[in-house]
Amino acid sequence: MLQDAYGNLREKVQIRIWRRAGKSVDRVTAEHLFEVINSREDVLRRLIRRCAYLKYVEARLGDRTLHADEILKDGFCLNMIDTPLCPMKVVTNLQEAVWDADIVINGLPSTETREVFQEISRYWKERITVPVIISLAKGIEAELQPEPRIITPTQMINQATNVPMENILYLGGPNIASEIYNKEYANARICGAEKWRKPLARFLRQPHFIVWDNGDLVTHEVMGGLKNVYAIGAGMVAALTNESATSKSVYFAHCTSEMIFITHLLAEEPEKLAGPLLADTYVTLLKGRNAWYGQKLAMGELSLDMGDSIKGKGMIQGVSAVKAFYELLSQPGLNLLNPTENKHVAPVELCPILKTLHKILISREQSCQGILQALRDETMNDPRERIEIAQSHACYRPALLGK
């Protein structure tokens, strides 16, 4: 999108994208890509004009192997084959990509962020100016010692590079990448220090892509990871009940009450997060990769042994987020009173959906059917009661976000 908007201003803006080299495109994907190319006259003409069409013919016939970085230069992303992009300057050398960049946009999964930015920091030792970093990653890690707390991708970047937090921002919102590129109306928030977020909001904004700004960086980032957890369960429920609207609404009532409960643990003013969180959850349930993943698991078309990096979709970040939130909310130091049983319990005991997802995805004690069993458990409290617990007790734990 930035290439489309600013690519003609080469004197002022140069855009390059880094991608690891070596990932090959299989024959089935190459055949599908060829169909996409031939269905779009503008794309077909562009490739012919650039003398790039023949290699896609050869790949379609099985006479050539294409690579992901190679096709990205022509505007084809391996995880978005049906959405041709504009041609990009692609580099496979990380140092070349970042060494003199004024703005670095982190499109890595949260599970890859720390390792890659540790490498980047080596290339920035001689830098005089401090870069600005915008992270898109939605996911968290749990740090349990000395005190339990959440580590977000922007904090990972800060730890890995020593770039100050005022120069690291988060951009996120209820949107699907292919739809944004196709100019469907969308909005997002850029969160971080005022010094950078306001000018960057103007820089990123397009007529169809409205960017608001907000100062609450880490909380918005965590909420982006939280909705991925419950999206996986929603996909499972949809598949197991043959898309039953009633069953999905029962699940939605429970998962939203758990998310509200967790936001009361994390945020001093959780009500401010309700709108953005629900909007992001809604779009993820409709069309996100985490809900898709849960659906395919329940249908038996994917298995946990295949890992959480899925061909054609990329990293399913909800899996690692389930593990992190479960570990964090299991810590006895966070215990609070459960008025129903009149005893103190770890917060995770009040989140039966999160517990069940952990049993399915992480400890593998249950099959996907476990999510329906959890919904039908007669001992499960009314979701309203969970919200009342959150609102009527001193739930807020500022240490969880390192505050």
Image (cartoon, rainbow, N blue to C red):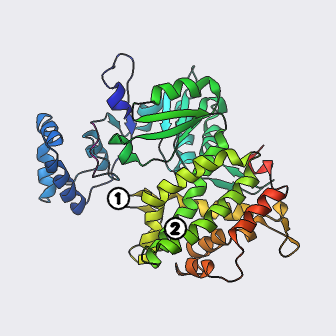
Q: Secondary structure at mark 2?
A: helix
User: In which quadrant of the rendered image does the N terminus lie?
Assistant: top left
Q: Where residue 113 sits: x, y (%)? A: 54, 46
Amino acid type assigned to the residue bearing label 1 in the image: Gly
- Give the side of residue 179 with respect to residue 379, left or right: left
Query: Label 2 belongs to which residue?
Result: 234
Could you tell me if the residues under marks 1 and 2 are in contact, i.e. CB atoms within 8 Å? Answer: no
Vertically, is 205 above or below 263?
above
Stretch of the chain drawn in magenta: 82-86
- Give the side of residue 142 with respect to residue 16, left or right: right
Q: Is residue 324 magenta?
A: no
- Give the side of residue 8 with respect to residue 204, left or right: left
Front in this rendered view, residue 212 or 72: 212
Specify the quadrant of the image occupied by residue 52: top left
Specify the quadrant of the image occupied by residue 264: bottom right
Question: Magenta span: helix, strand or loop, mainly?
Answer: loop
Labelled disc at residue 312: 1
Q: Where residue 247 sits: x, y (%)? A: 52, 75
